Image: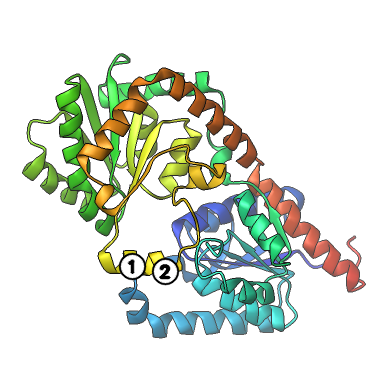
Amino acid sequence: MAALRIGIVVGEASGDILGSSLIKAIKQKYPDAQFEGVGGPLMIAEGFNSHFPMDRLSVMGFVEPFKRLPELLNIRKSIKEYFTNNPPDLFVGIDSPDFTLNIELFLREAGILTAHYVSPSVWAWRQGRVKKIAKAVDRMLTLLPFEAEFYHQHNVPVTFVGHPLADQFAIDPNELEQQKQNVRELFNLLSSDSVVALMPGSRGGEVSLLAEPFIETARWCLHQRSDLKFIIPAANDQRKKQIQRQLQERGKGLPIQLVDGQSREVMTAADVILMASGTAALEAMLLKKPMVVAHRLSWFTHLIALMMVKIKFFSLPNILAGEALIPELLQKEVRPEMLGPLLLERLQDEQQRQQLTARFTELHEQLRQDASTRAAEVLLTMIEKRKQSSGIVNQ
């Protein structure tokens, strides 16, 4: 009998991580399974056959995709033609919904089984997209439980498989505390130091809007407590230079350590975190860290967001909990006299820290489902049911 064959397309590094773990999990049951489409270095290392370099799909912002539109359309056309002429047992789009959902829709209409792994944020904005998703996929795999609830409400076949990040972090707070002390040695920090992590984001636009108020917040906090130490992880060389300029202009004399990358280690070493909104807030939650989340947009983008976004909270810990576990500050609220008191309160209130740790642990347990294994099981069941309905019996 022919080996199992699965098409996969990912468009960025996070998808490559998910894709490689998924391939490993599927190979546990089908060692000879074949995988092809578009993938990154981690997937290729697992034997994946990538027809195009993944980085050709990795475009961000509003302008860059338009510049690259002809190339992107040609790649998408080629993928559609290839899998239509060489139908796989299943096609999986991983994240990158603007690119992959169109392929899924085309292939499903051609009779090919399709799935999408990582839901787009249809529950937050542009909810009308769920109609296209319903036509494009035989099943949606979500990382978060409330996403699955949204699809159930719209009669889209869905399975919550858990979040892969939740499988990477220890749940036991005592184990996390030991990790904190170990990691502090990397940054020449003492176990007795009171450490605040400042994380103004990984993108240039985020850093340009948040680095200044974060540095000024450090100054404000030091006026209240002179023993504090601060550490900032720079996502890459460009962000490092950008933050260095801000430190030279506004942070002279402040005990702020700037390090290359190591954002997870920085969060692990910290007692409290001031951060941009994003996936890092989920990592901070899994590390059981008190945090304050800030979000600033250009006035025009903020205006559009007000009209389109349909959710009460914008940070993942609060969205998951359905309540305000952590402070969220927006736009003009992002200033030292508002950020500083919230940081110090979370640094100094031990009872509040313990309550937050307990809630974060509950949420961690909810997300910790061995996501890659669960996703593989769901996808393989889909394939087996399709074969049974087609009269094909596995040998």
- Residue 335 appears in which quarter of the rendering? top left
Determine whether, in the image, residue 129 is placed left or right of residue 60: right
Residue nearer the viewer, 169 or 324: 324
CB contact under 8 Å: marks 2 and 1: yes
Disc count in the image?
A: 2
Q: Dot 2, how many residues are within 10 Å of its Cα: few (below 14), some (14-19), or many (20+)?
A: few
Tag 2 secondary structure = helix
Task: Give x and y (percent) for residue 380.
Answer: 76, 58
Residue at numbered disc 1: 303
Residue 266 is labelled as: none
Residue type, mark 2 in image: Met
- Residue 308 vertical placement versus 168 (above, below): below
**Alpha-carbon neighbours of circle 1 within 10 Å: few (<14), some, or many (≥20)?**
few
- Looking at the picture, the colour scheme in use is rainbow
Residue placed under numbered mark 2 in the picture: 307
Give the residue type at disc 1: Leu
- In percent of width and height, residue 391 lies at 92, 72
- What is the residue that sits farthest to the top in this orientation? 192
In the depicted structure, whether residue 33 falls above or below residue 126 = above
Secondary structure state at the residue bearing disc 1: helix
Residue 381 lies in quadrant: bottom right
Residue 58 in view (yes/no): no
Q: Is residue 102 visible?
A: yes
Give the image location of residue 2, x and y in percent: 79, 68
Residue pictured at 85% horizontal, 68% vertical? 387
Q: Nearer the viewer, residue 197 or 25?
A: 197
**Quarter of the rendering occupied by the C terminus:** bottom right
**In screen coordinates, is 19 left or right of 187?**
right
Q: Residue shown at 16%/21% (left/top)?
A: 226
Question: In the rendering, at what x and y percent does residue 155 appear?
Answer: 73, 67
The N terminus lies in quadrant? bottom right
